[in-house]
């Protein structure tokens, strides 16, 4: 069949690399969600659920497609037995949440029968998924009293700190975070924790957030530590005179126009999909800005939720999260040796790991489903 002749088939051209995309619609609760499964070579798809008032379904679709692909690479880099997936709920996290909406979402996740596991992301909280848990076991990162591993932004933030230390080592010859200036965009679950740690270390911060409460909380903390925090508005964060940019809000913030404004020496943050597209990794490379690939830096949350396969152990998760430091240094070294952008070096490493898995023997024993000890 010639797809071009059949209008409705054009939709498939938007996700030629993805295994499965599920549109979830429940008028009774107002749920409009999309689940994208990118690649299950390494295991069932895993990825958080983002809630955002997207302007259009197309915008939500683009976001979930990019985010789920990023999860495939993140899982490969972190060496966990999961594949890449992600979900988005179209709605305002401040106004549109309800227990029924998250329950309905749980039913759609359950309908995938173990192909997709999900939890928090931007705009959602561990508590939201207590409701989804009534409908499916394929939920990760719920509070510990519900059998989950709890807030995954804790190891994510720790991973960002390891990322900053490794980047400082590469740039300045020492892990030390003290006395340097950092520009943090977004003081949410991850950004607030990273900022608090940097304040404790005696760093100087420039911060921006649209949530005044988050800014006030950080300033209180900074006052206790006699640290300096300078609040900047909107796009001005791209122009401040900081050593390291720490994007912890949304993606696409490294693009043609922002790169021109950057005078940073390094970029290390939790935001997913920081590069608007691959060419921006090359542009950073040419401008001599050291970029810590996002999916390596922000894999702490993934490391924690993937670890729910085993009996819970915070120590083990924190230990595994330390690997982010070494992984980044290896990627920096490889990129330098081969004169390629760090983003390209990270992608090459992940693709090689997936190819190796495909080559490995896979003797049949029984269905390769995770054993979720905690809730089975
Ligand atoms: N929570 C986690 O464990 C993980 C998070 N990430 C990524 O890290 C980023 C942050 O995640 P969370 O902290 O969980 O989200 P969050 O929703 O808790 O925080 C996002 C923060 O960004 C702020 N923000 C929104 N628009 C902004 C703007 N225009 N300028 C400045 N600030 C703005 C929000 O007010 C909020 O404080 C997201 O891209 C997420 O996908 C990645 C891996 C794991
Ligand atoms: O942190 C989580 O709950 C899942 C991992 C994830 O979605 C992410 O790393 O972006």
Image (tube, rainbow, N blue to C red):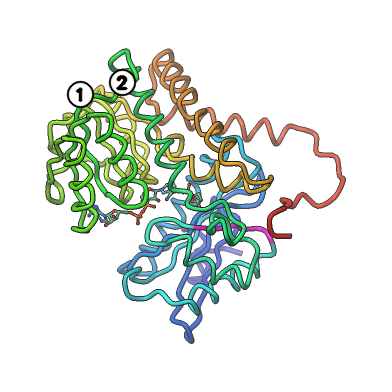
Residue nearest the viewer, comparing 43 with 23:
43
The quarter of the rendered structure image containing the C terminus is bottom right
Looking at the image, residue 301 lies above or below residue 375: above
For the point 52% across and 35% down, the residue is 318
User: Left or right: 90 with respect to 245?
Assistant: right
Residue 176, which numbered label?
A: 2
For the point 42% across and 60% down, the residue is 50
Question: Do the residues bearing badges 2 and 1 touch, measured as CB atoms within 8 Å?
Answer: yes
Residue ID for mark 1: 179
- Quick check: is 117 in the magenta stretch? yes
State the separation of the CA atoms marked 2 and 1: 8 Å
Residue range of the region highlighted in magenta in the rendering: 114-119
Residue nearest the viewer, comparing 369 with 179:
179
Looking at the image, residue 124 lies above or below residue 356: below
Q: Residue 52: where, in percent of width, then height?
A: 35, 65
- Toward the front, the furthest residue is 224
The quarter of the rendered structure image containing the N terminus is bottom right
């Amino acid at each position: 069949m010639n797809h071009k002749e059949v209008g409705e088939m054009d939709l498939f051209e938007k996700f030629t690399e993805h295994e499965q995309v599920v549109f979830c619609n429940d008028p009774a609760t107002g749920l409009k969600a999309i689940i994208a499964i990118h690649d299950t070579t390494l295991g069932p798809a895993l990825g958080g659920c983002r809630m955002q008032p997207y302007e259009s379904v197309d915008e939500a679709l683009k976001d979930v497609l990019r985010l789920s692909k990023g999860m495939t690479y993140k899982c490969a880099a972190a060496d966990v037995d999961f594949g890449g997936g992600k979900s988005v709920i179209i709605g305002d996290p401040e106004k549109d949440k309800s227990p029924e909406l998250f329950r309905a979402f749980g039913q759609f996740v359950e309908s995938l029968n173990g192909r997709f596991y999900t939890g928090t992301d931007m705009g959602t909280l561990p508590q939201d998924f207590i409701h989804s848990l009534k409908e499916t076991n394929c939920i990760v990162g719920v509070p510990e009293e519900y059998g989950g591993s709890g807030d995954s932004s804790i190891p994510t933030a720790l991973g960002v700190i390891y990322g900053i230390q490794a980047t400082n080592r590469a740039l300045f010859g020492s892990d030390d975070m003290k006395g340097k200036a950092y520009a943090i965009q977004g003081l949410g679950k991850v950004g607030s924790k990273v900022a608090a740690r940097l304040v404790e270390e005696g760093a100087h911060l420039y911060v921006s957030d649209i949530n005044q409460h988050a800014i006030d909380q950080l300033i209180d903390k900074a006052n206790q530590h006699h640290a300096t925090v300078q609040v900047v508005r909107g796009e001005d964060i791209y122009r401040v005179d900081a050593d390291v940019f720490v994007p912890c809000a949304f993606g696409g913030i490294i693009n043609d126009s922002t790169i021109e404004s950057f005078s940073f020496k390094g970029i290390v943050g939790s935001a997913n999909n920081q590069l608007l597209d691959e060419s921006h990794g090359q542009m950073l490379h040419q401008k001599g800005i050291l970029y810590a690939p996002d999916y390596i830096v922000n894999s702490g949350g993934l490391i924690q939720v993937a670890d729910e396969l085993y009996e819970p152990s915070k120590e083990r998760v924190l230990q595994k999260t330390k690997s982010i430091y070494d992984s980044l240094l290896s990627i920096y070294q490889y990129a330098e040796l081969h004169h390629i952008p760090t983003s390209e070096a990270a992608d090459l490493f992940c693709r090689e790991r997936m190819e190796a898995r495909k080559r490995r023997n896979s003797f049949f024993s029984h269905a390769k489903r995770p054993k979720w000890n905690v809730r089975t």
